[in-house]
């Protein structure tokens, strides 16, 4: 039986373990111990992702990620009615430790009640928050399952991520010419000025209901009294529409060509890279069908909702694994106002347990 108090305690213990992206070792060691105590065999792949299984043919995957965003060090969880919150100086870490806690509680419940269950593979990845890096380095030769349930969505477990966009990151490096800003600025060619010309030619914000574009950082120059020689622009765009993605690539190319004509002595280099690929769930998708059936058996109505973000589910699906991402009771992700609703967290554990049952 799912134990509410134990589930909340486990979650609070997990969020007290610092695990910002790239520093998940303490979290991995703790989870290894917990999974072994639950009778699972554990291993790590070469990238440090944690994998566990209970043996058997045709398993299903239960997955979440171990890392959190900043500010995520020294988290102090507090119970506030039916919510778990931080003290307001950090995130809570519900993304994605609410998902981890729900999986652990379901495993504990199944073990205690000696319930017949499906063969399982548990996958806890590293560095999800920095671009699904752990999943993209996951050793899929160690994985047998063809279906994955990913506990990494916002809201209650009845909320299913129905679609996710393709994410393209870009870096534009501008090289101008340095000069003393007070003595001979006319001999310089400001990379910052050139970067501004590029940015004003690019779109910003939400472009349509499927597409967003953002300039995330600009870094350039060295000192106040020198004309900046180098500047780098980092940004991203996302869409579920392939034609729109091609149009944005063309806009970037046209903007760069226009600025090259304005500043022929400058050097402009651009690099675009796909972080993850789009998907849209279909009615006959195996993992989706499994989750909907489990939700209905619990009296919960599935809600299909598209997302502008990506998860490890994008990578699983790219590797021919039917993956579905479900809510894990977390709200206001990536902010110090983040909170987890305890009743929804309990429902997440119940859903996970129901999915595991034979």
Image (cartoon, rainbow, N blue to C red):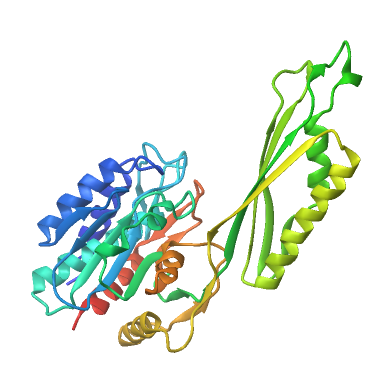
Q: In the rendered picture of this protein, how many numbered marks are placed on residues?
A: 0
The location of residue 262, given as percent across then percent down, is: 90, 41
The location of residue 229, given as percent across then percent down, is: 75, 26
- Is 176 displayed left or right of 34 in the figure? right
Residue found at the very far bottom of the displayed protein = 284
- Vertical position of residue 111 compared to residue 217: above or below: below
Which residue is nearer to you in this view: 268 or 294?
A: 268
Which residue is nearer to you in this view: 53 or 291?
A: 53
The location of residue 309, given as percent across then percent down, is: 54, 62
**Which residue lies at the image location 34% right of the left edge and 72% below the top edge?**
148
Quadrant hosting residue 195 = top right
Residue found at the very far top of the displayed protein = 183
Quadrant hosting residue 105 = bottom left
Which residue is nearer to you in this view: 17 or 10?
A: 17
Name the image quarter holding the C terminus: bottom left
Is residue 203 visible to the viewer in this orientation of the structure?
A: no
- Vertical position of residue 216 compared to residue 246: above or below: above
The location of residue 52, given as percent across then percent down, is: 20, 60
**Which residue lies at the image location 45% right of the left edge and 74% below the top edge?**
159
**Which residue lies at the image location 49% right of the left edge and 53% below the top edge?**
131
**Which residue lies at the image location 76% right of the left edge and 25% below the top edge?**
228
- Vertical position of residue 349 compared to residue 68: above or below: below
- Is 236 displayed left or right of 356 in the figure? right
Which residue is nearer to you in this view: 276 or 224?
A: 276
- Is 345 displayed left or right of 183 in the figure? left
- Is 275 displayed left or right of 340 in the figure? right
Name the image quarter holding the N terminus: bottom left
Is residue 93 visible to the viewer in this orientation of the structure?
A: yes
């Amino acid at each position: 039986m799912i134990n509410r108090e134990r589930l909340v305690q486990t979650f609070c213990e997990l969020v007290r373990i610092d695990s910002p992206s790239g520093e998940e070792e303490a979290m991995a060691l703790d989870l290894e111990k917990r999974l072994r105590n639950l009778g699972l065999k554990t291993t790590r792949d070469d990238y440090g992702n944690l994998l566990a299984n209970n043996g058997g043919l045709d398993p299903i995957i239960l997955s979440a990620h171990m890392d959190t965003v900043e500010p995520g060090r020294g988290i102090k969880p507090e119970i506030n009615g039916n919510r778990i919150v931080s003290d307001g100086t950090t995130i809570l870490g519900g993304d994605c430790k609410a998902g981890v806690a729900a999986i652990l509680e379901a495993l504990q419940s199944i073990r205690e009640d000696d319930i017949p269950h499906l063969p399982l593979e548990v996958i806890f990845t590293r560095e999800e928050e920095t671009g699904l890096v752990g999943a993209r380095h996951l050793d899929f030769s160690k994985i047998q399952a063809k279906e994955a349930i990913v506990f990494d969505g916002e809201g209650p477990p009845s909320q299913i991520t129905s679609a996710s966009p393709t994410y393209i990151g870009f870096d534009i490096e501008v090289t101008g010419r340095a000069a003393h800003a007070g003595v001979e600025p006319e001999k310089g060619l400001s990379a910052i000025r050139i970067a501004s010309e590029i940015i004003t030619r690019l779109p910003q914000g939400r472009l349509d209901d499927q597409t967003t574009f953002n300039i995330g950082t600009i870094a350039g120059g060295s000192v106040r009294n020198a004309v900046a020689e180098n500047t780098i622009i980092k940004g991203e765009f996302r869409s579920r529409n392939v034609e729109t993605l091609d149009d944005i690539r063309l806009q970037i190319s046209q903007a760069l060509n226009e600025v090259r004509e304005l500043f022929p002595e400058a050097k402009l280099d651009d690099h675009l890279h796909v972080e993850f690929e789009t998907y849209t769930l279909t009615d006959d998708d195996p993992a989706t069908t499994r989750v909907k059936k489990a939700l209905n058996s619990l009296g919960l109505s599935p809600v299909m909702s598209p997302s502008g973000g990506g998860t490890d589910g994008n990578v699983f699906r790219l590797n021919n694994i039917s993956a579905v991402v479900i809510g894990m009771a977390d709200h206001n992700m990536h902010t110090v106002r983040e909170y987890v609703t305890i009743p929804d967290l309990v429902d997440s554990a119940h859903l996970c347990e129901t999915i595991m049952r034979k």
